[in-house]
Amino acid sequence: MKISRRVFFSLLLLVPAILADGKDKKPKPQKKDFLAFAGTYTTKTQSKGIYMFRYDAANGKMTALGLAAETPDPSFVAIHPSGKFLYAVNEGGKSSFVTSFSLDAKTGKLAQLNQVPSLGEDPCYITFDQSGKYILVANYTSGTLAVFPILPDGKIGEKTYLNQDTGSLGPIKDRQEGPHAHWIETSADNRYALAADLGLDQIAIFQFDAGKGALGPHIPPSAVLKAGSGPRHAIFSPNGKFLFVVSELSSTATSFSFDPKTGDLKQVNTASTLPPEFSGRNDVAEVAVHPNGRYLYVSNRGMDSIALFAIDPKKGTLSPRGTVPTGGKEPRHFTLDPAGNFMFVENQLSDTIVVFHVDALSGELTPTGDTLSVPSPVCLKFIPAE
């Protein structure tokens, strides 16, 4: 096929644009510098609020930058997807709050914007819906779930929904005397909200109305765990096909398949977070999935260890792969860095954050020898630094 001279020269003129477009689509270098914010307990401790750090992802080194904001008992924090705001729950019994802060990504400094009642007692978890327009809060003692809008200036608006958990209580009377909401997240498509209730032994399932910021009924209304489990936290697999639930009272991890079309959960298997030879008090706390989706981690308080599980990528089955000591007492929370190369374990009663290297191939953890001194650390979140 012959090409006319006019068409030929027109194509020549397009070459620089094509090359430039290809250059623009080359992979951008990943961020190496991050800021990290640690939530703490201030009551009967030396802590004053939220502490900040600078993190070098190339070598896993964390440098303390001091107090970012003075605020009472900020036990769980969440950084807005825009990177401009940070939100914290302030546990305080009947006088509990949710606080908004502006965030300076260059200095890490926080400035309080406003504070609203959490609409329940002792909020213990805070997150965003997938649009970043709403805050979702789990109030532990009262068993309530609250939804608040985020205003354009980052402040927290008047609640759009409040749910009181109800259902059959679990058999452990001193811990399951009432509903205890402990975790809530929305599905990847923002159509559903799932919430763990420790007192009811269930993962509640709601329709989520992203236009109104409301939780609606779902049939079935929940997925029920074994009586006395006490589900605390949960996390979706990176591909969204599975939900992994960790239960505080039974020291177990349970895998569910998740149907994104219907929002339904179906139990796959349950495994203990403890070795057979362990005896004594233990309370499971946090859960995390490696970014490659092959490994699950769970913290044990009492045994003071991190339990490792291999994940079957097709079935979602969990297989125990041992435990690693956390190098401190009461690992209430831990987190992987954004790339999954390092793990930071917050030992609440030791006032330390202990750093581990993560082997992405085996999932194994190895202490790096680095330990940060932080009063009563119970949460840690990262954001790329400017």
Image (cartoon, helix red, strand yellow):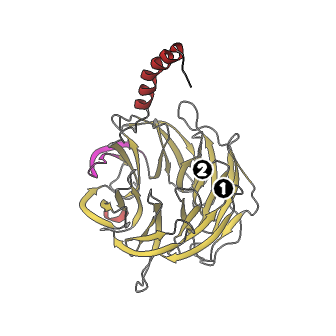
**Of the residues shown, which amino acid type is indicated by label 2?**
Ala
Q: Residue 122's spot in the image, x, y percent?
A: 54, 57
Q: Which residue is mark 1?
A: 260
Dot 2: within a 10 Å radius of its alpha carbon, few (fewer than 14), some, or many (20 or more) residues? some
Q: From what the image shows, is residue 281 above or below residue 122? A: below
Q: Is residue 55 magenta?
A: yes
CB atoms at circles 2 and 1 under 8 Å apart? yes
Asked which quadrant contains residue 109, the reply is top left
Q: Position of residue 102 (x, y in %)?
A: 45, 35
Determine which of the numbered discs, if any, sits on residue 188 in the image: 2
For the magenta stretch, what is the residue range?
52-71
Looking at the rendered image, the quarter that the N terminus falls into is top right
**Residue at point 35% right, 58% down?**
344
| Residue type (three-letter) at the residue carrying disc 1 | Pro
Which of the 4 image quadrants contains residue 224? bottom right
Left or right, 260 with respect to 81, comes to right
Q: Is residue 149 above or below residue 253?
A: above
Position of residue 382 relative to residue 140, above or below, is above
The answer to whether one can see residue 178 in this image is no
Q: Is residue 208 left or right of residue 140?
A: right
User: As drawn, is 140 to the left or to the right of 307?
Assistant: right
Label 2 to label 1: alpha-carbon separation: 8 Å
Q: Which residue appears farthest toward the front when viewing the image?
A: 1
Q: 174 and 221: which one is in front?
A: 221
Q: Main secondary structure of the magenta part?
A: strand
Image quadrant containing the C terminus: top left
Provide the secondary structure element on which disc 2 rests: loop
As drawn, which residue projects farthest toward the top?
6
Which secondary structure, mark 1? loop
Q: Residue reaching furthest left? A: 369
Q: Nearer the viewer, residue 44 or 26?
A: 26
